[in-house]
Image (cartoon, rainbow, N blue to C red):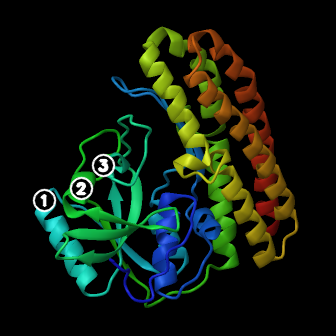
Amino acid sequence: MLAPLATFESLETHHCVTGSMRHIYTFYDHPISEEMLFGLGEGTGYIYWHQKGQIPFLGGRASPEPSVEELVGQRTGVQLTPHTTSSARKAEAVLLELLESGTPVMLQVDMGFLPYMDFGGEEYHFGGHVIVACSYDADAATVLVADRDRELHPVPLEALAQSRGSKHKPFPPKHKWYTFDFTGKRHPTIPEIYTAIANQAQLMLNPPISNIGISGIRKTAQLLPKWRDVLSEVDLRTTLFNAYIFISPVGGTGGGTFRYMFSRFLDEAAERIGNDKLHQAARDFQDIGDRWAALGEWCQEMSAAPSPCAYLDEAVEPLQEIATLEESAWKRLATVVDQGG
């Protein structure tokens, strides 16, 4: 039976990126919670995106510059380097070389090509998924990978190459992998934690474009009923089901479109910093997560309804209420950071 690298520990995680990073950090004896990694990486946000020729997408994760991964590295003393290549052969050769040297490798993949993923018989593709390769069997041409569940999964090299080289939009993986240098590892400073919180509040309250942040949630409330006019029934059902996936724990958000993870980050930050006001902010986002979770369940139900077009207006008020609650919560949190940071 294929076994992982010595000392590699398989963990149950929530979000594929920060969960994979936690696997790597734990392997290198730098134990930091996934929630802290997520918060330090400024992962909480909101985006509504409807690209021409694609179905609408809504999600609760931010995409800061530098990236979540790079910000985490900067604030934990870890040198993280992303790599991409157009060559499947080179990507595979580097992967096997690293595994043979005893190094686990964080990979970006299209989950639709992973044989252990179950989409109920439907074809589904998302190329922004991240996993960790933690062993290799040359005779079986199989790589062992860690995902968000505790179980380790053997993946044939052929399937892994297909997953890494997927062309499906909007997030083709481009054979991306990451290397890490833990020589300068450290825990985050209090100013770094405050800065991470402040930047997430800034993005939500003052986004650069109207489909991001609080304004993006309000824009979703405005545009969602119009899906009936621009989407076929098949695409509408897919869009609703995707919305459920990217709100619920199934899609790697930790539930409540990442708000539960952010709430736990704030609780941990409160303990580390010694600022009890962050505990109240954590309760705010726990409650907001409940609102998002309820909307996600509605999306799932409507995706299978006899005539989903007839019910789209039902989502307007919940989205407007969420926008109001988020705006108030982020403003209070920004004030706490200003006073404490």
Relative side of 332 to 70, left or right: right
Residue displayed at 54% across by 79% down: 76
SS for callout 1: loop
Q: Amino acid at mark 1?
A: Ser
Q: Is residue 59 visible?
A: no
Instruction: Write down the quadrant of residue 85 in the picture.
Output: bottom left
In the displayed structure, 271 sits above or below 302; it is below
Is the residue marked by circle 2 packed among few (<14), some (14-19), or many (20+) residues within 10 Å? some
Q: CA distance from mark 3 to mark 1?
A: 18 Å
In the displayed structure, 7 sits above or below 146; it is below
Instruction: Write down the quadrant of residue 138 in the picture.
Output: bottom left
In the displayed structure, 153 sits above or below 86; it is below
- Point out the tag, 3 or 2, that comes first from the N-terminus: 3
Q: CA distance from mark 3 to mark 2?
A: 6 Å
Q: Count of labels shown?
A: 3
Relative side of 183 to 136, left or right: right
Q: Which residue is mark 1?
A: 87
Tell me if label 3 and label 2 are in contact, CB under 8 Å: yes
Mark 3 or 1: in front is 3
Is the residue marked by circle 3 packed among few (<14), some (14-19), or many (20+) residues within 10 Å? many
Image quadrant for the N terminus?
Answer: bottom left
Residue displayed at 68% across by 74% down: 191
Q: Which residue is mark 2?
A: 159
SS for callout 3: helix
Q: Which residue is mark 3?
A: 113
Instruction: Write down the quadrant of residue 257 in the picture.
Output: top right
Measured as percent of width and height from the top left, residue 54 is found at 37, 27
